[in-house]
Image (cartoon, helix red, strand yellow):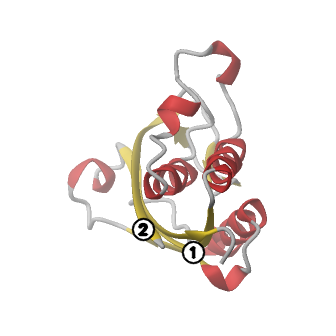
Amino acid sequence: MRIGHGYDAHRLTAGRKLILGGVEIPFEKGLEGHSDADVLLHALADAILGAAALGDIGHLFPDSDPATEGIDSRVILRAAAEKAAAAGYLVENCDVTVIAQRPKLAPYLDAMRGNIADDLGLDLSAVSVKATTEEHMGFTGSGEGMSCHAVVLLNQGDD
């Protein structure tokens, strides 16, 4: 078994859709980035790659590549899981925490869990997605951006 941790943060900006966990959330701002800037899926993909000692999403999908501009982060997540599987590891479960002052994310958490379960081939009970604020402290608390922590457990694929 291997454990991986991923972290990502993106600035909020006007004129972008807010996408978290593959779910479009109505909000006046979205996350800035080369891809769709889904901070949750980026942290999760990095956790998978890290657990398998396979680098990070910047190596798989560099922000200097025009072909990946605007890419759906669900593609990134599936690619990370496929790369781990090719190295002999399967995702057993994951736990992610999105840090955002607003909008309130509770109504969207189950849809995010469903997307992740579908993309990783997991039972819904193996996927945890939570959200919290930072009580108006720091860049997330001021509404300047959002961040996410993710932890995954990988197991040998043949076990």
Can I make out residue 98 in this image? Answer: no
Give the camera-side residue of 66 and 122: 122
At x 67%, y 28%, the residue is 70
Q: Please say if 157 is above or below 119.
A: below
Q: Which quadrant would residue 109 be assigned to in this image?
A: bottom right
Residue at 21% x, 58% y: name it: 137
13 lies left or right of 26: left
**Residue 75 located left or right of residue 6:** right
Circle 2: element type: strand
Give the amino acid at mark 2: Ile
Mark identifier at residue 68: none
Residue 119 showing in the rendered view: yes
Q: Name the outermost residue toward the bottom.
A: 125
Q: Are marks 2 and 1 in contact (CB under 8 Å)?
A: no
Give the side of residue 79 with respect to residue 11, left or right: right
x then y, percent, for residue 81: 65, 54
**Which residue bears the numbered disc 2?**
3
Label 1, on which residue? 106
